[in-house]
Image: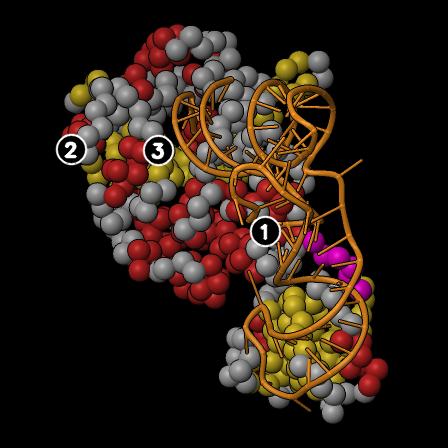
Amino acid sequence: MYINEAKENVGKEVEIKGWVYNIRSSGKIHFLLIRDGTGIMQSVVSKSDVSEDTFNTVKKLTQESSIIVKGIVREDKRAPGGYELLLKDIKVIQLTKDYPITPKEHGVGFLMEHRHLWLRSKRQWAILRIRHRIEKSLRDFFDKQGFTLVDAPILTPNACEGSTTLFETDYFGKPAFLSQSGQLYMEAAAMAFGKVYCFGPTFRAEKSKTRRHLMEFWMLEPEIAYITFEENMKLQENMITYVVKEVLNNCKEELKIIGRPTEPLERVEPPFPKIHYKEALEILEKHGKHLEWGDDFGGDEETILAAEFDKPVFVHHFPVESKAFYMKPDPDDPETVLAADLLAPEGYGEIIGGSQRIDDYDLLLQRIKENNLSEEDYKWYLDLRKYGSVPHGGFGIGLERTVAWIAKLPHVRETIPFPRLLDKIYP
RNA sequence: UCCCCGUUAGCUCAAUUGGCAGAGCGGGUGGCUGUUAACCACUAGGUUGUAGGUUCGAGUCCUACACGGGGAGCCA
């Protein structure tokens, strides 16, 4: 039996294979907390119920020893979780000595050094279960609507945008780079499959050292042929709403463990507020932050803007010069692009960046040249505007920032099993 | 890359003005029949990050370096 099946096994004799989470003793009765990956369950060992051998074996158990226990499941209000195991027999697989992570407090540095063991702690378990639920519901959302998952390459031949620092590696004597986005490949795929998305790791060699940055992070990037700018935002609203509902419905226990208040999440319903870049500047001005036209938002600015609303908020129509080369200028206002960022509530900042893409060959070529990018490198990308070009758009959602927001974590480093941080790649 | 803070027992932290290096957790031993990070008693555990300097005397003051944390910038 797995611990999360306790309810269906009340009164039955079962076997649980797991690890010792904690042990308390009161002389002639031991309370053993066992975890098996699906949850934590208390096991009661009374001296009068078991052999002396078994009783002494339990007495000597240490934190994180691996064990297989047999006993009868019963309901008891005194047990954490409401169910406990009346232990009959125990087999010790390995008696653990000196497990470094104790039930008391530890510093972040120490815990990160022991990330491979920290994963076993209740809080980390809950966070990564929520991450899994978010990944699953994101994929379900797109799969249900007929999107095709198209995997983007991780090794790429050139700096797709030239602006950010890429990790370089050797590709049979030629330089190759770790991908920072699958978008350009998804544009090719959208012309083949109509509605596509990719979901994988992306890399940046930026010397960023903040609570919102990782060197390796996961991004889901949908791309849709013939979509309009407004439809794109609608899709994002529906996606975020779906994911939040799925977490609320399926991760009640996990949310409780990490102490995440659910009211702010329950408010997440379409439509989300949408503000023009110009309005954003006005809101910031009102809060004493003066930005010039074309300035990008920093962490502070994003927090101020998001705090104006109790839902995620779109900021759209950014100045052309502040955004990427492939974004399509608004025909009614060519100084701005048809792009929107989605800012998460509660100070979590940008979690989605999306836009209409330039579908005109000449304009795209012009923008490539203006940005000092190599025409040769983008030959295949330009081909997409030569053979049956259509209006299209998409977006990228950063998984770790989304998890950090939904789980209300102070730092993205706990949202991924093995975070890659500035200058830190162990374990 | 820049700014700020820190580094003392396995872990989290104390140590008054520069004057005997100490507690909780974890470990060990013993006790306790319903515990909830259990509790109680006893016990072992230290080159105070490294290298120099000032001083009768440095965990404490100075310099450099290393490592960790927080923030800024950078940032599909």
Of pointers 2 and 3, the one earlier in the residue sequence: 2
For the question of whether residue A155 can be seen, the reply is yes
- Marks 1, 2 in one chain: yes
**Mark-to-mark CA distance, 1 and 2:** 42 Å
For label 2, the crowd category at 10 Å Cα-Cα, with few meaning under 14, some 14 to 19 and many 20 or more, is few
Of pointers 1 and 3, the one earlier in the residue sequence: 1
- The kind of residue tagged 3 is Gly
Which quarter of the rendering shows the N terminus of chain A?
A: bottom right
Q: Position of residue A349 (x, y in %)?
A: 35, 38
Magenta span contains residue A97: yes
Q: Position of residue B73 (x, y in %)?
A: 39, 22
The residue where tag 1 is placed is A106
At horizontal 71% and vertical 13% (from top left) the residue drawn is: A173
The residue where tag 3 is placed is A299
**Numbered range of the magenta stretch:** A95-100
For label 3, the crowd category at 10 Å Cα-Cα, with few meaning under 14, some 14 to 19 and many 20 or more, is few
Q: Position of residue B34 (x, y in %)?
A: 58, 85
Q: Chain of mark 3?
A: A
Q: Chain of mark 2?
A: A
- Residue A249 placement, left or right of A29: left
At horizontal 65% and vertical 66% (from top left) the residue drawn is: A21
At horizontal 39% and vertical 7% (from top left) the residue drawn is: A369
Q: Position of residue B9 (x, y in %)?
A: 71, 48
- The kind of residue tagged 1 is His
**Mark-to-mark CA distance, 2 and 3:** 17 Å
Rendered position, A69 above or below B12: below
